[in-house]
Image (cartoon, rainbow, N blue to C red):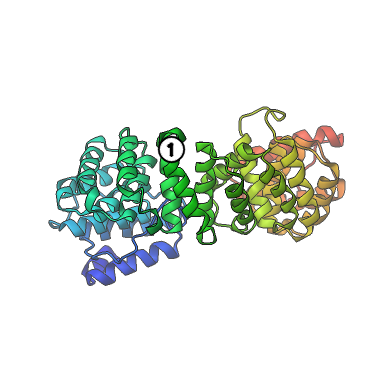
Amino acid sequence: MSAGSLAASGPSSRTSLLHSVCRSLGIGSAARSWRAPSQPLTCQISNRAAAIVTCCLQRARSTSRRSPVGLGGLHASETGQDITPEGVLDDLCVLAEAQVCDEEHLHSFLADAKDKLNSYNSQQLALVAQAMSKLSYYDPVLLQALDKNARLMMPFANPKSATMTAWALAKLDWHHADSFMELYIDTFGQKLNQLSASDLACCIWAMAKVLPLQHDANFVRTLVNNARHKLDDFSPSDLSLLLWAVAKLGYYEERFVRAVMREVPHKLDSSVLDSEDQDRISFAMVVFDGMASFIEARAMLKDYKPAALANMAMALAHQHEGKHPNEDSNPGLILALVEAVKQKLRFFGAQDMADTLWAIAKLGYTDRELLESFAYYASYQLDQFTPKDLANTAWALASHGFYNESFMSTFLSTAGRKLMEFQPHEAATLTWALSKLGTSAGTPPRLKA
């Protein structure tokens, strides 16, 4: 596929092709923060956007599927023709979807957006703000102009567009995001029932990010009441935004927390949770632990599926990162989690098993029965462990000081066969762990080629 062939296509087919290829390669589409517009774009992708995204797609085949993509030798001077305001917007949305990270090229496109900002309505301004937040591009001059125009249009905007702008400004840590949110509250406080579940999650997250609960407790109560009626529609990522926000705001309304916690087992049973989702969920769990409704929720852990248990373990481990193993470790919650894992371990897949063992080790919790069960069930799945899984497993076992001769024999054979696939940091972790395990075993274990 060449840039020329893309640029020669009709504008609608070009956009469709670029978006479909981006999604098929996993570029950008897995990021929870990106909210695709509900209506089709005007589809006027420029030659330069086609060239840049094509370059991104070609490079992506040899890079991580979830990593932002650089552009190598492509120069910003390759700009093509003058572009309409709608075309600039389309370009930005596609570049955000492809996670183009080269500042030189982003600056060129966003400079065009800045020049055409006065041509945009509130929905288009929201799309510019979303693209900037997706690309983590902070330009105070552009943000100032975008903020000013969005405020002027606020009385004529629909709640969804204004919500997405507020969310994007908060995500970018724009220093006037708090006053923008105040204007949003004054304008749309009585229209929250028009928001979807995803919009409600973004709204309450933005408010929690920039304003305290005391600012407008009635608005928060209205948000929460609307969210309660739409909990079934919340995606796992939306639920993580909601949980983080109510915990951050200190909104401890028992009935609502109980309703949310009933959703957790189903929503956490998903592979689409990224590290930010996990961090937000774990923050809420730590804050809510001790509440009656949350203590009840611990008992529900036995009903969680393996993926949900693994996600919860990883979330708690991320929350605990950097702390001493025994500091603020929420022993009641961890104990309930470990007991649930022991009951379900035989149903775990390779990655969930490795992630859970690593997370529990990170939390500083040791359970001999769990480790013995892991050694038994994991030995049948070691061929499915990736180098990262193997390195993390070795690190976890070494951290626990656990050595099982039969398991280690199979483990060393598997790791030896895959050694050439290890990244340097994974090989370093494995080396450290085997040395540490040698202390427990009496002699250092050796890899079997």
Residue shown at 75% from the left, 50% from the top: 299
Quarter location, residue 55: bottom left
- Of residues 388 and 156, the one drawn nearer to the viewer in this rendering: 156
Is residue 332 toward the left or the right of residue 124 in the image? right
Is residue 136 toward the left or the right of residue 321 in the image? left
Give the residue at mark 1: 209
Residue type at tag 1: Lys
Q: Is residue 396 above or below residue 351?
A: above
Quarter location, residue 169: top left
Q: Is residue 150 above or below residue 226?
A: above
From where the camera sits, is residue 262 visible? Answer: yes
Q: Secondary structure at mark 1?
A: helix
Residue shown at 27% from the left, 46% from the top: 106
Crowding at dot 1, Cα within 10 Å, few <14 / some 14-19 / many 20+, comes out as some
- Of residues 292 and 447, the one drawn nearer to the viewer in this rendering: 292
Tell me where residue 72 appears, x and y as whole percent: 33, 48
Which corner quadrant holds the N terminus?
bottom left
